[in-house]
Image (tube, rainbow, N blue to C red):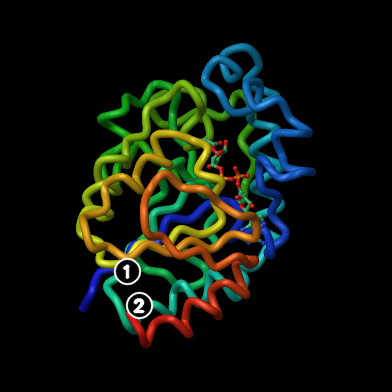
Amino acid sequence: MRKLVVLSGAGVSAESGIRTFRDSNGLWEEYPVEEVASIEGWHRNNALVTGFYNQRRRQLEKAQPNEAHKLIAELEQYFEVTVVTQNVDNLHERGGSTHIIHLHGELTKARSVKASECDYSLPGSKAVIDIGYKDIHIGDLAPDGGQLRPHIVWFGESVPELSRAAREVEKADILLIIGTSLNVYPAAGLVNYTRPGCKIFLIDPQPMHLRIPDFKQIQAPATEGMKQFFKEIGNL
Ligand code: OAD
């Protein structure tokens, strides 16, 4: 089976009612990113940061995967698929995808502030605690006695899953980029790991200008774009 890697961002969840970051009315317009999504912001005001992610988690509980998440899952019938997502929601999982790398962490997980990167980046690590849709409060402690924090990669932190994601992109026959402005590195740099001959598709309602040759844009929202992508599959 040929290998298809999906690189997804906030736009794939937009039609599930989850706000993107940089569109007009995006989250970063309402919340200063350096206050709610940076390691410095956490040290300045951890109550503000936990509150921001508690709100995101409550919204996620009410959201449903949309047709784009479901069609991405359906690609597994035709390809060996890995979804590399910048999203911290769980809508790819709930849409049925089975191989997912979360570059920027997961809303439904928490970890101790004392856990080291080697601890929490190991697959199945006990340092990462499943909290479902429950709020995190200041004073909630992990078994090691450290304050619980969202299991999210903030600005100023490294991206432990990056090399695993890069290895997947290197193996791809097809790369499908969907719903990401490709503004945030190192995630955006993953497109440079494709091997020669890899076919690159991009689904986004805005015109995109990538500094890579030969990509085909399907200029449409994620759900409509995925339907169009399925029509292309026969020619791939
Ligand atoms: P952005 O908000 O930067 O970009 C969202 C992209 O989705 C844009 O290109 C939009 O045009 C597109 N879009 C909007 N509606 C869409 C729809 N219905 N269907 C498809 N596409 C649509 O979000 P990301 O690229 O995901 O990181 O942002 C990357 C990272 O920046 C996030 O993971 C987050 C943020 O800061 C952290 O917080 C660490």
Where is mark 1, residue-wise?
A: 81
Q: Are marks 1 and 2 in contact (CB under 8 Å)?
A: yes
The part of the image, by quadrant, that contains residue 50 is top right
Image: 7 above or below 146: below
Asked whether residue 155 appears in the rendered view, the answer is yes
* Amino acid type of the residue that numbered disc 1 sits on in the rendered structure: Val
Image: 131 above or below 80: above
Residue at image location 58% in from the left, 20% down from the top: 42
Residue 87 horizontal/vertical position (percent)? 52, 49
- Side of 95 where 78 appears, left or right: left
Q: Secondary structure at mark 1?
A: strand
Residue at the top extreme, as displayed: 44
Where is mark 2, residue-wise?
A: 76
Asked whether residue 108 appears in the rendered view, the answer is no
Q: Which quadrant: the C terminus? A: bottom left
Say whether mark 1 is within 8 Å of ligand 1: no
The earlier-in-sequence mark between 1 and 2 is 2
Residue at image location 65% in from the left, 27% down from the top: 33
Image: 171 above or below 31: below
* Amino acid type of the residue that numbered disc 2 sits on in the rendered structure: Glu
| Front residue of this view, candidates 155 and 135 | 155
Image: 125 above or below 60: above
Q: Secondary structure at mark 2?
A: helix
Q: Which quadrant: the N terminus? A: bottom left
| Front residue of this view, candidates 3 and 97 | 3
| Front residue of this view, candidates 220 and 78 | 220
